[in-house]
């Protein structure tokens, strides 16, 4: 089992189902990577590095989505 803390909420993933990268997590959540800023363990991750930034059990991730309007 794996655990990620996403925007303050713990999400548990079954064995071998935890997303390996930020890009995988966004696909799992159905979030378009062009509309989000990701922070991993307090550090902002460049969008170009979403597919190469590995996630580990216990990581804390903050995702901020941009939405049109005002």
Image: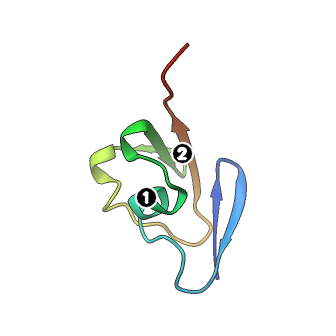
Spatial distance from mark 2 to mark 1, Cα to Cα?
14 Å
Q: Which mark is residue 2?
A: none
Neighbor class of circle 1 (other Cα within 10 Å; few <14, some 14-19, many 20+) is many
Tell which residue pokes out farthest to the top in this image. 70
Question: Residue 42 at x, y = what percent?
Answer: 54, 45
Q: Residue drawn at (36%, 40%), measured in percent from left and top?
A: 34
User: Which residue is located at x 48 percent, y 70 percent?
Assistant: 19
Viewer-side residue, 54 vs 24: 24
Which color scheme did the rendering employ for the protein?
A: rainbow
User: Does dot 1 land on a helix, a strand or a loop?
Assistant: helix
Q: Which residue is mark 2?
A: 42
Percent across and percent down for residue 54 are: 41, 66
Place residue 13 in its image quadrant. bottom right
Q: Quadrant of residue 36?
A: top left
Left or right: residue 39 versus residue 58 is left
Sequence-wise, the earlier of marks 2 and 1 is 1
Q: Is residue 60 above or below residue 2?
A: above
Residue located at (54% from left, 44% from top): 63
The C terminus, quarter of image:
top right
Q: Which mark is residue 22?
A: 1
- Residue 55 in percent (x, y) is at 47, 66
């Amino acid at each position: 089992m794996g655990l990620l803390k996403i925007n303050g909420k713990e999400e548990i993933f079954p064995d071998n189902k935890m997303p390996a990268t930020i890009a995988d997590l966004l696909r799992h959540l159905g979030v378009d990577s062009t509309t989000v800023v990701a922070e991993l363990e307090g550090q902002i991750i460049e969008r170009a590095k979403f597919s190469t930034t590995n996630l580990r059990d216990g990581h804390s991730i903050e995702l901020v989505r941009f939405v049109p309007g005002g």
